[in-house]
């Protein structure tokens, strides 16, 4: 089954292999093999893995070399809302959103497929129903599409910044200002390809607004509102202003407390229902372990 991706302003400037590795959730080596074999083409031509994508380029992907069929699994889900078109889920920290990089089990998609047969298949089985993502170790609210129509409408709403998202984060250090706005472009790190960083090279614009909720002796609890949705955006931006997230093993180079992961929770989601157009809002508190770590700093 062939998949076609038309490059837009959000995608252009990325390397072909890097973009597809992120977009398809596969390793760069896997993507490279398929580019070299001609199963991935740009404008119907075989190109190099490092080809820099241009606006309106047409990427075609056909019959990749391995079977990535995703199996339904009986995994408990915390469903906040469900109807014929959408599901709103509260994802636990530690759960990967969709299969990739050789990991095709125990993800949110596996759990969703075990919950219902009605999921959008427009993104392929690996991304059944997935409208947007949060990191493995970020907990909180995710929106899932049960139909292709709902997926297309909601994806456009995310792209056009019509969806409201709020995150709760615990960061190192005491932030003096009550409010702040971080405007700094984000791209992939040249030093560590698994990390993102603030850079002017092959980057995309990124804007994070934050408000201080509570100050402690050595940390600050904040609320973040995203104007853009870049990979690791809050983690990168807070590290950029020297207030990295507590317990983040990747950014900030600070000692981690345990293996819970970065202290980041997707607490609020507001959006227009794709079919009824009614504005819907959902809010959920952080997990028990998140609160326990916050209290450690609160009681110091």
Image (spheres, rainbow, N blue to C red):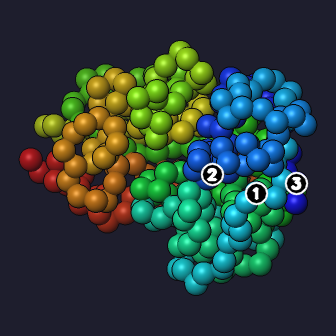
Q: Is residue 202 above or below residue 195?
A: above
Instruction: In the rendered view, tell whether residue 278 sits above or below residue 221.
Output: below
Assess whether mark 2 and mark 1 are in contact (beta carbons under 8 angstroms).
Answer: yes
Q: Position of residue 22 (x, y in %)?
A: 61, 44
Q: Residues under labels 1 and 2: Cα distance?
A: 9 Å
Give me the residue at 34% from left, 42% from top: 250
Identity of the residue drawn at 73% across and 42% down: 36
Answer whether labels 1 and 3 touch (C-beta < 8 Å). no
Residue 81 coordinates in the image, percent (x, y): 65, 68
Q: Is residue 76 visible?
A: yes
Q: Earlier in the sequence, mark 1 or mark 2?
A: 2
Measured as percent of width and height from the top left, residue 236 is found at 42, 32
Instruction: Give whichever of 150, 232 is nearer the camera.
Output: 232
Residue located farthest toward the front when viewing the structure as drawn = 37
Q: Residues within 10 Å of mark 3 (few under 14, many from 20)?
A: few
Q: Residue farthest to the right?
A: 44
**Dot 2 corresponds to which residue?**
30
Question: Relative to 22, is 102 above or below?
Answer: below
User: Distance between the Cα atoms at labels 1 and 3?
Assistant: 9 Å
Mark 2 Cα-neighbour bin, 10 Å: few <14, some 14–19, many ≥20: some
The residue identified by callout 3 is 2
Q: What numbered label is drawn on residue 64?
A: 1
Secondary element type, mark 3: strand
Q: CA distance from mark 2 to mark 3?
A: 17 Å
């Amino acid at each position: 089954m062939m998949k076609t991706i038309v490059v837009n302003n959000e995608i252009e400037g990325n390397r072909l292999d890097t973009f597809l590795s992120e977009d398809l959730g596969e390793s760069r080596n896997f993507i490279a093999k398929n580019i070299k074999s001609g199963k991935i083409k740009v404008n119907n031509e075989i190109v190099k893995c490092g080809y820099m994508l241009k606006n309106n380029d047409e990427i075609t992907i056909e019959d990749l070399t391995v079977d990535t069929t995703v199996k339904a699994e009986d995994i408990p889900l915390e469903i906040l809302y469900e109807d014929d078109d959408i599901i709103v889920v509260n994802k636990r920290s530690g759960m990967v959103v969709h299969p990739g990089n050789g990991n095709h089990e125990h993800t949110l998609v596996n759990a969703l497929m075990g919950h219902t047969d009605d999921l959008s298949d427009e993104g392929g089985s690996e991304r059944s129903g997935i409208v947007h993502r949060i990191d493995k170790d970020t907990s909180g609210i995710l929106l899932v599409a049960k139909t292709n129509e709902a997926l297309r409408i909601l994806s456009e709403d995310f792209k056009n910044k019509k969806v409201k998202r709020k995150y709760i984060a615990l960061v190192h250090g005491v932030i003096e200002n009550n409010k702040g706005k971080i405007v700094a472009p984000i791209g992939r790190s040249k030093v560590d390809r698994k990390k993102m960083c603030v850079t002017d090279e092959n980057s995309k614009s990124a804007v994070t607004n934050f408000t201080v909720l509570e100050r402690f002796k050595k940390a600050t609890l904040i609320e973040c509102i995203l104007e853009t949705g870049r990979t690791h955006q809050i983690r990168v931006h807070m590290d950029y202003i020297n207030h990295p997230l507590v317990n983040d093993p990747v950014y900030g180079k600070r000692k981690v407390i345990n293996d819970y992961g970065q202290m980041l929770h997707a607490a609020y989601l507001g959006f227009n229902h794709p079919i009824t157009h009614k504005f819907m809002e959902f809010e959920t508190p952080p997990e028990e372990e998140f609160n326990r770590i916050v209290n450690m700093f609160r009681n110091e």
